[in-house]
């Protein structure tokens, strides 16, 4: 497996099954970092496919290491927790920040996500404006303030 790295662009892999939430998240991220590349998937298996696959003519961004992964817990197919476990079992992905961005307030979900290696567990706010503000802060922090070594 080969992972291509494109350091000039901040890349976010967003796994979100709700199309409306995905659109809000993408819009908010682009307001924070205009040159952000958002790759959106709606199923857990798609995250694994993207991370483990090489680029192709049909999907040139496949296999490019994301700068940040935003992962919902309630994904169809493999859950966000299953995907997080898969990511953290692979040394080549261990330094990619994974943020659980979810509607679940279940303490077991919080505990499990953090135990599996999530960098943060964030509840999606109910209002669109609060969700946008949270994502803008999140993207600003991970793209400009935090140093990951990439």
Image (spheres, rainbow, N blue to C red):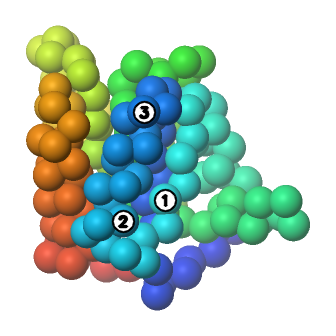
Mark 2 and 3 residues: CB-CB less than 8 Å, in contact?
A: no
Residues packed near mark 2 inside 10 Å, few (<14), some (14 to 19) or many (20 plus)? some
- Screen quadrant of the C terminus: bottom left
The residue under label 2 is 30
- Front-most of residues 26 and 7: 26
- Screen quadrant of the N terminus: bottom right
The residue under label 1 is 38
The residue under label 3 is 20
Mark 1 and 2 residues: CB-CB less than 8 Å, in contact?
A: yes
Quick check: 37 left or right of 120? right
- In the picture shown, does residue 35 fall above or below 109? below
The disc, 1 or 2, on the residue closer to the chain's N-terminal end is 2
Quick check: 89 left or right of 48? left
Q: Quadrant of residue 64?
A: bottom right
Mark 3 and 1 residues: CB-CB less than 8 Å, in contact?
A: no
Residue at 56 percent across and 77 percent down: it is: 5
The disc, 2 or 3, on the residue closer to the chain's N-terminal end is 3
Distance from the alpha carbon under mark 1 to that under mark 2: 8 Å
Quick check: 90 left or right of 116? right
Distance from the alpha carbon under mark 2 to that under mark 3: 16 Å
- In the picture shown, does residue 150 fall above or below 16? below
């Amino acid at each position: 497996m080969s992972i291509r790295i494109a350091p000039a662009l901040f890349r976010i892999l967003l796994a979100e099954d709700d199309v409306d939430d995905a659109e809000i998240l993408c819009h908010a991220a682009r307001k924070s970092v205009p040159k952000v590349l958002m790759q959106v998937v709606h199923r857990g298996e798609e995250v694994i496919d993207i991370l483990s696959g090489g680029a192709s003519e049909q999907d040139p961004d496949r296999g490019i290491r994301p700068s940040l992964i935003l992962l919902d817990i309630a994904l169809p197919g493999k859950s966000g927790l299953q995907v997080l476990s898969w990511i953290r079992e692979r040394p080549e992905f261990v330094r990619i920040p994974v943020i659980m961005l979810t509607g679940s307030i279940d303490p077991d979900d919080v505990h499990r996500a953090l135990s599996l290696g999530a960098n943060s567990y964030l509840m999606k706010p109910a209002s669109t404006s609060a969700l946008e503000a949270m994502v803008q802060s999140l993207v600003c922090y991970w793209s400009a303030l935090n140093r990951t070594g990439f």
